[in-house]
Amino acid sequence: MIDHISLAVTVPDVSTDFYAKALAPLGYAVVMEMGPVRALGAAGEEGRKAAPELWLVPEQHPTTIHLALAAASPQQVDAFHAAALAAGGRDNGAPGERAHYHPGYYAAFVLDPDGHNLEVVCHDGPVEPVPA
């Protein structure tokens, strides 16, 4: 239902590099540039062209947010986490089930260069056995 979101960033080149690398495991790439404003998108099913979904917009003092993106599998969550850390993100929650949200909620969290809490989640992750 959400068409796109704008994320305020202090240094567009740094954030573009980070997001392009961190979200590559989900199929995201830079799809549009308008001066310092950049947009990333992921190609959809049946070869649908990638639409600009995540806009990176320069702002001197951005207010940090929590942004959660969907993954198709726990393996994509793991790949995102590794790619985001390699791109300079700071770990804010290693990949794993968060059963307190619901069984099978498999997610990882990384802080981007501006401190935004970027989460990638799969709702059909492995369900850990309940301790006896």
Image (tube, grey):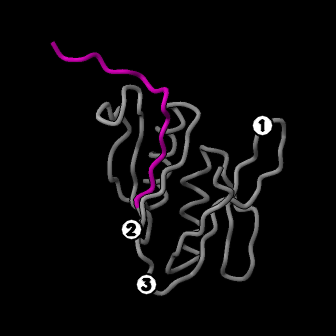
**How many numbered circles are shown?**
3
**Element at label 1:** helix
User: Is 98 drawn above or below residue 129 in the view shown?
Assistant: below
Tell me the amino acid under the disc marked 1.
Answer: Glu
Instruction: Determine whether, in the image, residue 84 is placed left or right of residue 42.
Output: left
Residue at image mark 1:
45
Tell me the amino acid under the disc marked 2.
Answer: Gly
Measure the alpha-carbon separation of dots 2 and 3. 11 Å
Q: Residue furthest top?
A: 132
Q: Which of the 4 image quadrants contains residue 116?
A: bottom left
Q: Residue at x 40, y 54 (%)?
A: 110
**x then y, percent, for residue 89:** 42, 60
Q: Which residues are magenta?
A: 117-132
Residue at image mark 2:
115
> Residue 119 lies in magenta, yes or no?
yes
Q: Residue furthest bottom?
A: 60
**Element at label 3:** loop
Residue at image mark 3:
61
Measure the alpha-carbon separation of dots 1 and 2. 32 Å
Q: Residue at x 51, y 40 (%)?
A: 79
Mark 3 or mark 1, which has the lower sequence index?
Answer: 1
Measure the alpha-carbon separation of dots 3 and 1. 37 Å
Alpha-carbon neighbours of circle 1 within 10 Å: few (<14), some, or many (≥20)? few
Tell me the amino acid under the disc marked 3.
Answer: His
**x then y, percent, for residue 59:** 52, 83
Camera-nearest residue between 77 and 45: 45
Q: Residue at x 77, y 52 (%)?
A: 50
**Element at label 2:** loop
